[in-house]
Image: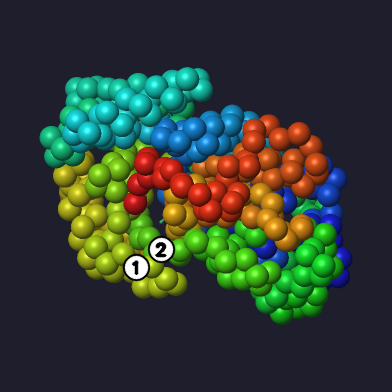
Amino acid sequence: MKDRAEVVIIGAGINGCALAYELAKRGKDVVVLEKHYICYGATGRCGAGIRQQWATKENALLAKKSVEIFERLSEELGYDIGLRQGGYLIAIHDEEEMRQAKKNVEMQRSIGLPVKIISPDEIKEIAPILDPEGMEAIAATFCPTDGHANPFKTTYAYARAAKKLGAKIYKFTEVKDIKVKDGKVEEVVTNRGKIKTKYVVNAAGAWSKEIAKMVGINMPNKPVRKEALVTEPIERLFDCMVISFKHGIYFSQQEEGQILGGIPSPEEKIGYYTEPTFSFLKHMAYMLGKYAPPLKHINILRQWTGFYDVTPDALPILGETNIEGFIQCNGFSGHGFMIAPMVAKLLAQLICQEKLDMPIDRLSMERFKGKITKEKAVVG
Ligand SMILES: Cc1cc2nc3c(=O)[nH]c(=O)nc-3n(C[C@H](O)[C@H](O)[C@H](O)COP(=O)(O)OP(=O)(O)OC[C@H]3O[C@@H](n4cnc5c(N)ncnc54)[C@H](O)[C@@H]3O)c2cc1C
């Protein structure tokens, strides 16, 4: 293992690998340290939905600019990431949700997103298997450029491209400590040796809080266990991701035909709990049948758990801290796959002292000192 690198990234999920690529592309000497293997964390357990329909402009812009990158990523990285843009259909259940949806759509359209509010009949036109009555939907919003990519292929494509440009990714290498001298990061201590560095990027997902503690930073993030399932593959029935903020459900049909989705478990827990629950399976199966009756009799193949790294306002924590060289890239609260391409680009610009494509100051930890505005468009 190298004993020196200009930038050390902790965590080889989508964010760590995408950032390694963006930095290597800019000629930086980068090392990624991963305590298990690429995609071990939330990235390898996620729905990998890509949604631009957010309530806050920060999330909407990060997602929109990421979609622009996703659209050319297979070509740029030289590997097919499995991007499919079948849209996101978000159920609207009552007048209160309709008021919020109208506000969201107005903001989303103002930044150029082709979002619209659709009727129950249009819901059925887009996805005939859906039952608006069973969904308890009075309408929905729909953005056709939203979609889905394969999280493994995307992350490995970034990792492979980063390595080709000289980045090193050390698997089974756990960060145990970070040495700080005169308010600056100096060295990262791992189970396989030490690395002197100028920048440490905390891209450790649900474990980011533990990493931040190593430099004396106390973060408000909480690891929350989330469950997901996948069914047997079936003939293609629909192309969009279906979600509901009220019910917390999301599901889509994968490229190979399986239905993949999740819903908050009745036994949802904060902390590093990894056991899957039967109550999740029962609840998800029941709700899936209500939303899409033809899926009632489909066989479930597998269920699993993963962590959301949840912040108090459901917005990520990005950028510099009061420890010089210690950069945050975490707090993605359940949507860190879809915004990773733009987050990586922005943090690479920050580290390379380039002009940022969009400001990220409002996403630093400083915001928690004042009144925060919670992102309302969260699911699961
Ligand atoms: C069930 C589920 C469904 C989801 N669905 C979606 C979705 O549809 N769309 C979307 O955008 N997002 C979704 N998410 C959220 C998304 O998966 C995450 O926000 C995103 O993958 C975070 O990526 P990351 O690279 O920041 O972190 P992670 O993928 O969690 O990677 C962090 C890595 O850091 C490593 N690490 C931790 N501590 C150390 C240490 N001390 N030393 C070395 N390495 C360490 C871990 O092993 C891990 O591999 C979902 C999440 C879950 C759990």
Image position, residue 85 (x, y; %)? 46, 31
Question: In the rendered image, is residue 202 in sight?
Answer: yes
Quarter of the picture containing the N terminus is bottom right
| Residue at x 68% of width, y 69% of height | 215
Which quarter of the picture shows residue 178? bottom right
Query: Image height check: is 284 above or below 241?
Result: below
Q: Name the residue under label 2.
A: 224
Q: Which of 32 and 105 is in front in this view?
A: 105
Query: Image height check: is 173 above or below 331?
Result: below
Q: Nearer the viewer, residue 91 or 84?
A: 91
Q: Mark 1 points at which residue?
A: 269
Q: Residue furthest left?
A: 133
Q: Distance between the residues labelled 1 and 2?
A: 6 Å
- Mark 2 residue element: strand
Q: Do the residues labelled 1 and 2 touch (CB within 8 Å)?
A: yes
294 sits to left or right of 303: left
Tell me the number on the disc at residue 289. Answer: none
| Residue at x 21% of width, y 54% of height | 285
What is the total number of numbered labels drawn onto the structure image? 2
| Residue at x 68% of width, y 40% of height | 346
Q: What residue type is labelled 2?
A: Val
Which quarter of the picture shows residue 86? top left
- Mark 1 residue element: loop
Image position, residue 187 (x, y; %)? 80, 70
The disc, 1 or 2, on the residue closer to the chain's N-terminal end is 2
